[in-house]
Amino acid sequence: MISIKNLHASIDGKEILKGFNLEVNAGEVHAIMGPNGSGKSTLASVLAGREDYEVTDGKVVFNNKDLLEMSPEDRAREGLFLAFQYPVEIPGVSNINFLKTAITEIRQYKGLPPLEAKDFLKLVKDKQAMVELQGSLANRSVNEGFSGGEKKRNEIFQMAMLEPSLAILDETDSGLDIDALRIVAGGVNKLRSSNRSFIVITHYQRLLDYIVPDFVHVMYNGQIVKTGTKELALELESKGYDWIKKETEQAI
Amino acid sequence: MADILEEVTGSEYKYGFTSDIEMDTAPIGLNESIIRFISEKKNEPAWMLEYRLKAYSKWLTMKEPKHWPHVSYPEIDFQNIIYYAAPKLKKELASLDEVDPELLKTFEKLGISLEEQKRLTGVQSNIAVDAVIDSVSVKTTFKETLAEKGIIFCSFSEAVQEHPELVRKYMGTVVPYTDNFYAALNSAVFTDGSFCYIPKGVRCPMELSTYFRINASGTGQFERTLIIADEGAYVSYLEGCTAPMRDENQLHAAVVEIIAHKNAEVKYSTVQNWYPGDKDGKGGIYNFVTKRGICLEDNSKISWTQVETGSAVTWKYPSVILKGNNSVGEFYSVAVTNHHQQADTGTKMIHIGRNTRSTIVSKGISAGLSNNSYRGLVKIHKGAKNARNFSQCDSLLMGDKCGAHTFPYIEIKDQSAIVEHEATTSKIGEDQLFYCKQRGIDTEKAIALIVNGYCKEVFNQLPMEFAVEAQKLLAVSLEGSVG
Ligand SMILES: Nc1ncnc2c1ncn2[C@@H]1O[C@H](COP(=O)(O)OP(=O)(O)OP(=O)(O)O)[C@@H](O)[C@H]1O
Ligand SMILES: [Mg+2]
């Protein structure tokens, strides 16, 4: 699905990603944890193609294509989806209109005609039910005046609508109440399939009780420094990051 | 981002063609004999000529308003303008077949098919069109259908001939020729425009529309529009404007007057797309327009909606005098400036009657090196008990070389008034753009989406077809403008 090799990226001359490596196969769920400032959101932004970052080295192959060569919109059209840590508000643009535009663009890229209105509305209805999003939210302006939790749920709704092949969730669980967490995780689980992969960035082991990952990685100082399974998350929860930081520093 | 800017700013002005139409023109320059020439060409009654001449002598004593508007442009040489240019029409036209085929082609290109319009009759969604090319009204459609309801919709010149009593009664009552420099000039030299009268109790069954087109080079366009809604009448009126691309600056100085009687309502919508000049600021229309309506009697309503994307320099304040009790005035505006365009636009709401209400929603969008100013006056006269105004002026900046300015003036002479003013300035954020791109939407479409969202309250006021056109226009005007 995606293969990230020796990725180096910097912003304003400061290197944040320092040789990041990760292989994600189709159908796998990878969790990335790590202390604040270790570069998790930076990784997500670089993969999504944010222009503020300069990629100085490395290679990323996504669905057999050179990801770093593609524009951000083409990456999205190729099936890469980022659920933002801080979703943006777009006043006056309804969620529905926004998604219609996005889906039309993605379909056009694939040489498909726009969805018929009734098919589109059916899709909205189905996905709304899947992520238990209130109808009124779908009709409101994109994220405008949404509560923190509503914004996160809206990201999952958009993900469900766009049916990506690789979804990167950047702290989608933070700011969610218990019920919302269950619903969001439920949405992700319903979307799990043999041809769809997830990279789940989180600080909390709790989320991984709901979305059981195949791998857990610890990111520190722009690299993956430890990889394990679900148990690693539990260990981190009880021990914190200090021991990993120490291990890493000793290794240098 | 700068690359994208470079890449797409070359987008073409779609209406920049010229047409080879045989023209009848006045000699260049302005003096009394030119005015007599125009009046004679139009076979006008003596009172009309007198009015013109009075306006002309007043104009001679007036000064161009160059200091207060937030715009700058080179001196206009009023002797270097042709004040009358008309397509040469062979006698009276008996049918469309006799219209110069070039002229018909022009309208086709503008998306107004007069032939088509003529065939479809009376269907609800239809629009009756009066087309004014350079100075002369060329063809008014649907006249017969409208006449059945007693509605008069014709060129201004025709109204002078056929309905002199109405023209004399109302012309100059809202915008007197003494009003300002350009209104005086217009009153002296106006050549044509549209006239519309909706009789008592009649709801006009279709949108009435005028298309203004400047074609000939070196000419000014001075049209006049007069709309009267008699007691209980309703009309929705649309105005569209385009011009060819030329290196020189051309002057457009129109006057629009609206009169709403008791319980009457007039909705006036404009999509102004005069040629804005090229990206280096060469050429383009100078648009100095006086538009004003009066809610003459109780419970009347006048609503202006404008989408301004064109012109090199715009100077325009569609206003409402709220004289009747419980009358309502509205102003919804989107003004876009890009490259070197300058716009100083806004409105005046003059509250005189009791319980009068006004709403102002102004959305300015500036890009490139342009300057966009909102200038508004809310005036509450003494005795205008319980007057209310709500104003919202938002500015959106694209890039950091453009300017947005707001000049709100408020004069309150009655303590019972409630006046609210809100203003915001925002920038199209990189974050918003990236968010859209991450969902598969490219930069151009993302800008269109964001800007349309920003203008939604105004677009909602436009009739459907116009709203679609306005959205497209906006997208074109702003192509490549995020830096
Ligand atoms: N413009 C910038 N200039 C310099 N440093 C920056 C800039 N933007 C981000 N950084 C730094 O990059 C580092 C990585 O930030 P990033 O947001 O990727 O961390 P994170 O792992 O997502 O943290 P969190 O868990 O708090 O979300 C931080 O130290 C941050 O301060
Ligand atoms: Mg982060």
Image (cartoon, rainbow, N blue to C red):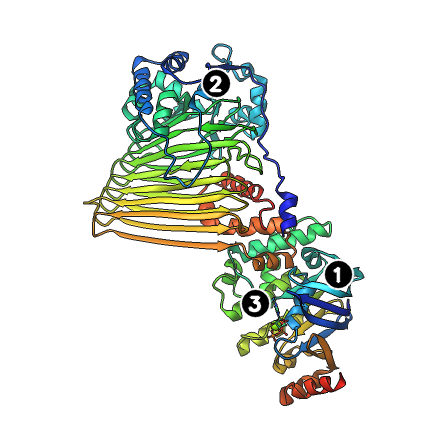
Identify the subunit bearing mark 3. Answer: A
Q: Are marks 2 and 1 on the same chain?
A: no
In percent of width and height, residue B123 lies at 48, 32
Which residue does the numbered mark 1 point to in the structure image? A67
Relative to B282, say whether A166 is above or below: below
Q: CA distance from mark 2 to mark 1?
A: 60 Å
**Pick the front one: A30 or B451:** B451
Disc sitting over residue A86 in the figure: 3
Identify the subunit bearing mark 2. Answer: B
Q: Secondary structure at mark 2?
A: strand
Q: Amino acid at mark 2?
A: Ala
Q: Amino acid at mark 3?
A: Tyr
Q: Nearer the viewer, mark 2 or mark 3?
A: 2
Q: CA distance from mark 3 to mark 1?
A: 23 Å
Q: Residue at x 65, y 76 (%)?
A: A38
In percent of width and height, residue A171 lies at 61, 73
Which residue does the numbered mark 2 point to in the structure image? B85
